Amino acid sequence: NADFEGWIVKQSTWRKEWRRRYMLLKGTTLFFAKDESSVPHQVIHMQDVEKIGEEQVLGRPLAFRVTMAKQESGANILKQMGAESTFLLQAERKDDFTSWMSTLKESLNSCRPNSTHVVGLTPRGPGGGLMGMAAAMQGGAGAGAGVTSTSSPGSRLRSKKTTPKAGGMHSS
Protein backbone atom coordinates (compact mmCIF):
# COMPACT_ATOMS: atom_id res chain seq x y z
CA ASN A 1 0.00 0.00 0.00
CA ALA A 2 1.16 3.51 -0.76
CA ASP A 3 1.38 5.92 2.14
CA PHE A 4 0.67 8.83 -0.20
CA GLU A 5 0.40 9.25 -3.95
CA GLY A 6 -0.76 11.65 -6.64
CA TRP A 7 0.14 13.87 -9.58
CA ILE A 8 2.92 16.43 -9.41
CA VAL A 9 4.83 18.51 -11.97
CA LYS A 10 8.58 17.83 -11.91
CA GLN A 11 11.45 19.59 -13.63
CA SER A 12 13.34 17.11 -15.84
CA THR A 13 16.97 16.30 -15.18
CA TRP A 14 18.55 17.17 -18.50
CA ARG A 15 16.33 19.55 -20.47
CA LYS A 16 14.91 21.28 -17.39
CA GLU A 17 11.41 20.95 -18.86
CA TRP A 18 8.45 20.69 -16.51
CA ARG A 19 6.61 17.38 -16.87
CA ARG A 20 3.58 15.96 -15.12
CA ARG A 21 4.54 12.83 -13.16
CA TYR A 22 2.85 10.41 -10.81
CA MET A 23 4.58 10.40 -7.43
CA LEU A 24 4.15 7.71 -4.79
CA LEU A 25 5.55 7.65 -1.26
CA LYS A 26 5.87 4.27 0.39
CA GLY A 27 7.53 4.42 3.78
CA THR A 28 10.69 6.42 3.21
CA THR A 29 10.94 5.76 -0.53
CA LEU A 30 9.57 8.22 -3.09
CA PHE A 31 8.88 6.92 -6.61
CA PHE A 32 8.34 8.92 -9.85
CA ALA A 33 6.63 7.48 -12.93
CA LYS A 34 4.97 8.78 -16.10
CA ASP A 35 1.59 7.51 -14.86
CA GLU A 36 0.01 5.23 -12.25
CA SER A 37 0.69 2.02 -14.19
CA SER A 38 4.22 2.82 -15.44
CA VAL A 39 7.40 1.42 -13.95
CA PRO A 40 9.13 4.12 -11.87
CA HIS A 41 11.94 5.87 -13.70
CA GLN A 42 13.36 7.55 -10.61
CA VAL A 43 13.50 6.89 -6.86
CA ILE A 44 14.45 9.04 -3.89
CA HIS A 45 15.32 7.46 -0.56
CA MET A 46 14.20 9.98 2.05
CA GLN A 47 17.10 9.16 4.36
CA ASP A 48 19.35 10.77 1.72
CA VAL A 49 17.36 14.02 1.65
CA GLU A 50 18.86 17.02 3.42
CA LYS A 51 15.82 19.29 3.31
CA ILE A 52 12.43 19.93 1.76
CA GLY A 53 11.14 23.46 1.37
CA GLU A 54 9.01 25.90 -0.54
CA GLU A 55 10.73 27.31 -3.62
CA GLN A 56 10.13 30.56 -5.49
CA VAL A 57 10.14 29.65 -9.19
CA LEU A 58 9.00 32.25 -11.74
CA GLY A 59 5.71 31.18 -13.27
CA ARG A 60 5.52 28.10 -11.02
CA PRO A 61 3.32 28.75 -7.98
CA LEU A 62 3.19 25.96 -5.38
CA ALA A 63 6.75 24.86 -6.18
CA PHE A 64 9.02 23.14 -3.71
CA ARG A 65 12.54 21.74 -3.66
CA VAL A 66 13.83 18.40 -2.39
CA THR A 67 17.57 18.76 -1.74
CA MET A 68 19.72 15.68 -1.38
CA ALA A 69 22.31 15.54 1.39
CA LYS A 70 25.91 15.96 0.31
CA GLN A 71 27.76 12.72 0.89
CA GLU A 72 31.44 12.34 0.16
CA SER A 73 31.19 8.80 -1.19
CA GLY A 74 27.67 9.17 -2.59
CA ALA A 75 28.31 12.48 -4.36
CA ASN A 76 30.68 10.90 -6.87
CA ILE A 77 28.28 8.01 -7.48
CA LEU A 78 25.40 10.44 -8.02
CA LYS A 79 27.46 12.47 -10.48
CA GLN A 80 28.59 9.38 -12.40
CA MET A 81 25.00 8.13 -12.64
CA GLY A 82 23.81 11.53 -13.82
CA ALA A 83 21.43 11.70 -10.88
CA GLU A 84 20.14 14.97 -9.53
CA SER A 85 21.09 16.44 -6.19
CA THR A 86 18.07 18.79 -6.22
CA PHE A 87 14.54 18.06 -7.39
CA LEU A 88 12.17 20.90 -8.27
CA LEU A 89 8.52 19.93 -7.95
CA GLN A 90 5.21 21.75 -8.29
CA ALA A 91 1.83 20.83 -6.85
CA GLU A 92 -1.21 21.37 -9.03
CA ARG A 93 -3.38 22.76 -6.22
CA LYS A 94 -2.80 24.54 -2.90
CA ASP A 95 -4.21 21.69 -0.80
CA ASP A 96 -2.03 19.20 -2.71
CA PHE A 97 1.01 21.41 -1.99
CA THR A 98 0.20 21.46 1.73
CA SER A 99 -0.41 17.70 1.81
CA TRP A 100 2.81 16.83 -0.06
CA MET A 101 4.94 19.16 2.06
CA SER A 102 3.53 17.76 5.29
CA THR A 103 3.77 14.12 4.20
CA LEU A 104 7.29 14.39 2.79
CA LYS A 105 8.57 16.22 5.88
CA GLU A 106 6.98 13.59 8.11
CA SER A 107 8.71 10.85 6.09
CA LEU A 108 12.02 12.72 6.23
CA ASN A 109 11.78 13.15 10.00
CA SER A 110 11.01 9.45 10.46
CA CYS A 111 14.32 8.35 8.92
CA ARG A 112 16.91 10.55 10.62
CA PRO A 113 19.92 10.27 10.83
CA ASN A 114 20.92 9.98 7.15
CA SER A 115 22.23 6.75 5.68
CA THR A 116 24.01 6.13 2.37
CA HIS A 117 21.41 5.00 -0.18
CA VAL A 118 21.91 6.22 -3.76
CA VAL A 119 19.28 8.04 -5.82
CA GLY A 120 18.94 6.72 -9.33
CA LEU A 121 17.10 4.57 -11.79
CA THR A 122 15.41 1.39 -10.69
CA PRO A 123 14.93 -1.96 -12.45
CA ARG A 124 11.53 -3.34 -13.39
CA GLY A 125 9.89 -5.04 -10.40
CA PRO A 126 7.48 -7.96 -10.12
CA GLY A 127 3.87 -7.05 -10.82
CA GLY A 128 4.88 -4.15 -13.09
CA GLY A 129 3.87 -0.55 -12.72
CA LEU A 130 4.47 1.88 -9.91
CA MET A 131 2.52 0.02 -7.23
CA GLY A 132 4.16 -3.30 -8.12
CA MET A 133 7.60 -1.69 -7.84
CA ALA A 134 6.74 -0.05 -4.53
CA ALA A 135 5.36 -3.30 -3.14
CA ALA A 136 8.43 -5.24 -4.27
CA MET A 137 10.88 -2.73 -2.77
CA GLN A 138 9.00 -2.49 0.52
CA GLY A 139 7.97 -6.15 0.75
CA GLY A 140 4.32 -5.05 0.77
CA ALA A 141 1.08 -6.43 -0.57
CA GLY A 142 -0.60 -5.83 -3.92
CA ALA A 143 -1.31 -2.54 -5.59
CA GLY A 144 -3.90 -0.09 -4.41
CA ALA A 145 -5.24 -1.95 -1.38
CA GLY A 146 -6.68 0.40 1.24
CA VAL A 147 -5.83 3.60 -0.65
CA THR A 148 -8.48 6.34 -0.73
CA SER A 149 -8.82 10.01 -1.67
CA THR A 150 -7.58 12.73 0.68
CA SER A 151 -9.13 15.77 2.25
CA SER A 152 -10.77 17.86 -0.46
CA PRO A 153 -13.39 16.51 -2.88
CA GLY A 154 -11.42 17.68 -5.97
CA SER A 155 -8.03 16.44 -4.80
CA ARG A 156 -6.17 13.90 -6.93
CA LEU A 157 -3.94 12.78 -4.05
CA ARG A 158 -4.51 9.55 -2.18
CA SER A 159 -3.42 8.52 1.27
CA LYS A 160 -3.97 5.40 3.34
CA LYS A 161 -4.45 7.69 6.35
CA THR A 162 -7.99 8.79 5.38
CA THR A 163 -11.51 7.92 6.42
CA PRO A 164 -14.77 8.68 4.60
CA LYS A 165 -16.99 11.41 6.08
CA ALA A 166 -20.31 12.81 4.95
CA GLY A 167 -19.86 15.16 2.02
CA GLY A 168 -16.63 13.66 0.65
CA MET A 169 -13.33 12.16 1.77
CA HIS A 170 -11.45 13.70 4.69
CA SER A 171 -8.20 13.00 6.44
CA SER A 172 -8.44 11.33 9.80
Image: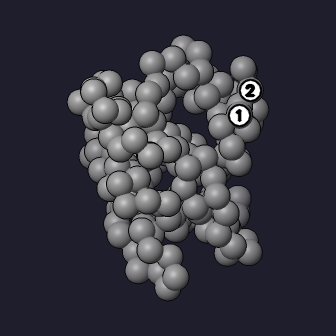
Q: Nearer the viewer, residue 71 or 15?
A: 15
- Residue at (74% x, 75% y) in the render: 15
> Residue 134 shows which numbered tag?
none
Spatial separation of the CA atoms under disc 1 and disc 2? 8 Å
Identify the image quadrant of the C terminus.
top left
Q: Amino acid at mark 1?
A: Ser
On screen, residue 61 above or below 129: below
Q: Would you call the spot at circle 1 few (<14 residues within 10 Å), some (14-19), or many (20 or more)?
A: some
Badge 1 element: loop
Does residue 5 appear anywhere in the picture? Answer: yes
Question: Percent position (x, y) of residue 88?
Answer: 52, 68
- Residue at (37% x, 61% y) in the render: 94
Q: Quick check: 102 left or right of 64?
A: left
On screen, residue 84 above or below 101: below
Residue, far bottom: 58
User: Within the image, what quadrant is residue 75 found in?
Assistant: bottom right
Question: Percent position (x, y) of residue 139?
Answer: 53, 18
Instruction: Kindly identify which residue carries mark 2.
Output: 128
Residue, far left: 172
Q: Would you call the spot at circle 2 few (<14 residues within 10 Å), some (14-19), or many (20 or more)?
A: some
Question: Do residues under tags 1 and 2 come within 8 Å of each other at their CB atoms?
Answer: yes
- Residue at (59% x, 62% y) in the render: 10
Residue, far top: 141
Q: Quick check: 62 left or right of 166?
A: right
Does residue 114 appear anywhere in the picture? Answer: no
Q: Amino acid at mark 2?
A: Gly
Instruction: Kindly identify which residue carries mark 1.
Output: 37
- Residue at (30% x, 50% y) in the render: 102
User: Within the image, what quadrant is residue 169 found in?
Assistant: top left
Badge 2 element: loop
